[in-house]
Amino acid sequence: MTAAPRIIAVADTDSYVKWAAALLGPVPGAELIVLETELVVSPQQQRAALAGSGLDRVRRARFAELPALLAGADAVLLAARGPLVRVLARLVARLDPPPVIVTGLPGISVPATWLALHFRRQCDLFVLHSHREIREFSHLAVERGIRQRFALATLPFARRTDAIARRGTDLVFAAQALVPRGRDARLEVARLLRRAAAAHPDRRVVLKLRGRPGEAETHREQFPYPELLASLGPIPPNLVTSTAPMRDALRTAEGLVTVSSTAAIEAAAQGVPVIALDTFGVRPSLINVVFEGSGLLGGADDVVERRFRRPSPRWVGDNYFHDPADDDWLERVAELVSRRRAGTLPVRRPHARVGGRARDAWERRLALGSADRSVTGSLAYAVGVPARAVARATRRWRNRLRRRPG
């Protein structure tokens, strides 16, 4: 009988640590390395991300320690932002013997994007979470000439294992760093939360944040909601903020509101109704086109009146709530591991690019940030930053010349 593959995940930011832990929690013997980068989770964020996952083999490590820690792995799950995956994939491919490289995205991944594919093109398997995502990424890969294998896994937060039997009374708003992006739009959301709190003073409005002030997140937030709320005057006593894990916030939720957070899928999986806020439209930049046809879209008045929705039965099967029997990612990993052991699965080579080792050092420094303390990284950064500034200025100058009439 063939032994189960030994899978080790490498993750750094809050959303990726939570995703990797939840995905690998049910996998016997799986391990997680939390990589020290500029955006690494704080110890408190790490505890929250791991809570309830069932994954107990976890350690923090520096980049230089990875070769020793990954030695002997059959498969390595790279759970990180695209630029970091690119750097890690090169390191993992150089291990002897080289493990199968698996990657994925931690939440809603519709629409499929070229950059998500490009940064992960050296990976052997790309894990997605719905039939629709598989279909859209497969089409884009063919269109862009990128050879990639895709596999299906139920979004860990969409597993129907902890359905809430008793509905609470909180309106929970799942904040996102990038959506909506501009200050005016985010200020409009802050005003909406105040309206919702004023309309029902006997019930709480909970602003669910990803982390505490000063804690890093996967995406940098330019206009934090607590600051915007404070700028509008005294905050209603029933409008509160929370950094507790989402599953805890949902236990006391009457319903969840978001623009496009994966929390909408997590809430629906637990039987909590949802409003996917369409006040700012429905378009790819808002990451909410996936909710078209879901029955979850609603406007500001729906939020104030707490007219929450449940997903349409015609939508769920193609979007995150497929039959768990359709999941094939672990089978695909085992198949690729067997092929790698037999020598019939070649190691994917890095995408051709100019710059050689200096380019590698530059990309490593950008991906790790201040956590890269190597001499080569420091030198590449010292040379690369001014060189990039000159290149961008030259590009802008050329573009202006092209736009000049005559």
Image: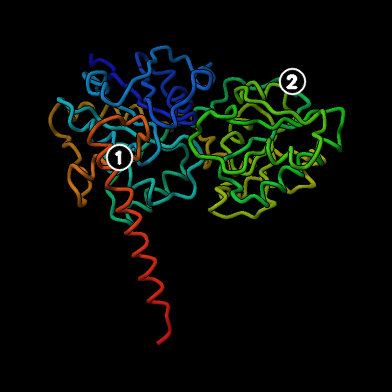
- Left or right, 209 with reference to 361: right
Name the quadrant of the N terminus.
Answer: top left
Q: Earlier in the sequence, mark 2 or mark 1?
A: 1
Extreme-bottom residue of the structure: 406
- Left or right, 9 with reference to 293: left
- Left or right, 226 with reference to 97: right
Residue 309 lies, with reference to residue 142, above or below; the image says: above
Q: Residue 305 carries which label?
A: none
Name which residue lies at 81% across and 28% down.
238
Name which residue lies at 32% across and 42% down.
120
**Residue that label 2 marks:** 166
**Residue that label 1 marks:** 86
* Amino acid type indicated by mark 2: Arg
Q: How far apart are marks 2 and 1 (CA)?
A: 44 Å
As rendered, which of 194 and 349 lies closer to the eye?
194
Whole-percent x, y for residue 297 in the image = 68, 47
Q: Residues within 10 Å of mark 2 (few under 14, many from 20)?
A: few
- The kind of secondary structure element at disc 2 is loop
Whole-percent x, y for residue 187 in the image = 70, 47
* Amino acid type indicated by mark 1: Arg
- Left or right, 149 with reference to 232: left
As rendered, which of 314 and 246 lies closer to the eye?
246
Q: How many labels does the image show?
A: 2
Whole-percent x, y for residue 25 in the image = 44, 18
- The kind of secondary structure element at disc 1 is helix
